[in-house]
Amino acid sequence: MIVSIMNILIILTLCVWQAWSLSIPLIITKGTHYEVGHDVGASFKDRIQNFCNEFSILNDVLIPYYHMRKGRKAYDDLLNVANATFPQIVDEIQGLADGAELPFYKVFLLHIKSEIQLLLRKQFDPECTDIALNYVDQKTQRQWTIQAHNEDTDPIIGKYAYITDAYIIDPTGKYPTERFTAYTYPGSVPGNAFAFNADGMLFTMNAVFPKKVETDNIARYIANRMLLGCRSVSDVFSFLDKYGSASGFSLNFVDATTPLADQMLYNVEVGPGMKQYSNATVPLANNKADGHCYHFNMYKHFNISQFNDTSTQHRSARAAKLAVPADLTGIYNILGDTADPDYPIFRNGKKKDGAATVSTAIFDLVNGTLSIYLDNPKMSQGPVIVLQLPKKKIWN
Ligand SMILES: *[C@@H]1O[C@H](CO)[C@@H](O)[C@H](O)[C@H]1NC(C)=O
Ligand SMILES: *[C@@H]1O[C@H](CO)[C@@H](O)[C@H](O)[C@H]1NC(C)=O
Ligand SMILES: *[C@@H]1O[C@H](CO)[C@@H](O)[C@H](O)[C@H]1NC(C)=O
Ligand SMILES: *[C@@H]1O[C@H](CO)[C@@H](O)[C@H](O)[C@H]1NC(C)=O
Ligand SMILES: *[C@@H]1O[C@H](CO)[C@@H](O)[C@H](O)[C@H]1NC(C)=O
């Protein structure tokens, strides 16, 4: 009897701890693509293995589909095009799988889950909210240039996520050197959440749900990973001009090394196929109404056939009712809002779609910082860490 009460107490303590744990591990690693993947996999082997055991989308959707003829064909197509176009990223994934002691196909399936879920037309990932603010307050003459992002996903991803700080070298000189810091989903290469690199390029990503999927093109997560290597705004557009996407994504990006008076926040909506994208910007304005933009998980400016996302409809309707942000507090008031009973903006994993806001990223381009929150930024006593963004490009 005593033992069972003790057990219950321990389980309760664990539950409370998990729900309120304000910690996330960080790995700092340098090596080839394969070595960096391997370091991350080996360091977080338990987290990645536990994640694979507990992640129902992998076990109930992706793996069964892989064992069907249609699913296996989609897997083979997506792997072949990735390996032919960006073999270094496939190496990185191989390293990750080897380091975590998992079969390659399981880890690769995690990288094509957006495409498979769209092909199956079910169980879309719960995804993110972004606010871009870029204006000069005429009263105080203070500039606010902020890219803010709620990372919303399955709570199990937040439980096992980590931050990767990678310095990727290639002794053969075939692939460019890369250096970036990224919030990373367990068992996936970085790029699909939020990140910045040594050239001051910062990226946040929103999922979108196009109706078409082109499995002879680059899977979204692999394209997102490649974007981390872009050293300038024009690199991003060159990448988008040169390569296509199997499904799509909405990319928010900023060059932190641009002089403040010229600062511009970009949003690109990418669709399936080659060169399928639309570019929108938030240039510096002299009032908050012109200098702000929200992004959820539906295409806004790219005319494309897409699935309705009920959560996006709720979150965007709620954000429209709240005051346009004039400062950080205004941003926190939106990103931390819990008023919608079914699909709130700040999500706790207990509402209709089971999504949780596992992290909030505040890129402040005036201060040159990235602040990361693991709790509700509206209620929080502060970020878990504040990282410095590069002030100038180190490579060129
Ligand atoms: C990728 O392509 C290379 C070269 O053709 C091949 O050796 C390797 O096995 C492929 N990797 C995967 C995971 O298919
Ligand atoms: C993206 O938008 C900006 C601002 O309107 C513009 O300067 C730039 O040329 C556009 N780039 C592309 C590739 O459309
Ligand atoms: C969007 O695309 C569809 C189909 O290509 C077309 O019929 C429609 O007129 C377009 N809408 C806008 C606003 O461009
Ligand atoms: C998607 O949502 C819009 C706006 O709520 C609605 O007008 C439209 O009919 C919906 N489309 C589908 C296919 O459900
Ligand atoms: C930027 O710096 C100002 C002044 O020190 C501070 O009030 C503000 O909180 C900082 N921004 C962030 C995101 O921490």
Image (spheres, grey):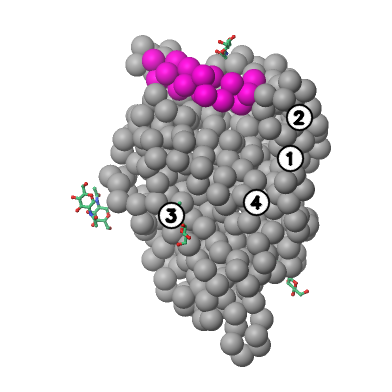
Instruction: Report which residue position mark 2 lands on.
Output: 169
Placement of the N terminus among the 4 image quadrants: top right
Q: Which residues are magenta?
A: 73-92
Circle 1: is it few (<14), some (14-19), or many (20+) Cα within 10 Å?
many
Q: Is residue 243 left or right of residue 135?
A: left
Q: Amino acid at mark 3?
A: Asn
Circle 3: is it few (<14), some (14-19), or many (20+) Cα within 10 Å?
some
Which residue: 53% across, 29% down?
Answer: 111
Instruction: Report which residue position mark 4 lands on.
Output: 201
Disc 1, SS: strand
Instruction: Report which residue position mark 3 lands on.
Output: 279
In the rendered image, residue 370, in percent from the top left (x then y), is placed at 71, 58
Disc 2, SS: loop
Q: Is residue 86 magenta?
A: yes
In the rendered image, residue 17, in percent from the top left (x then y), is placed at 73, 46
Q: Amino acid at mark 2?
A: Ile
Q: Earlier in the sequence, mark 3 or mark 4?
A: 4
Q: Is mark 3 within 8 Å of ligand 2?
A: yes
Instruction: Report which residue position mark 1 lands on.
Output: 179
Q: Earlier in the sequence, mark 2 or mark 1?
A: 2
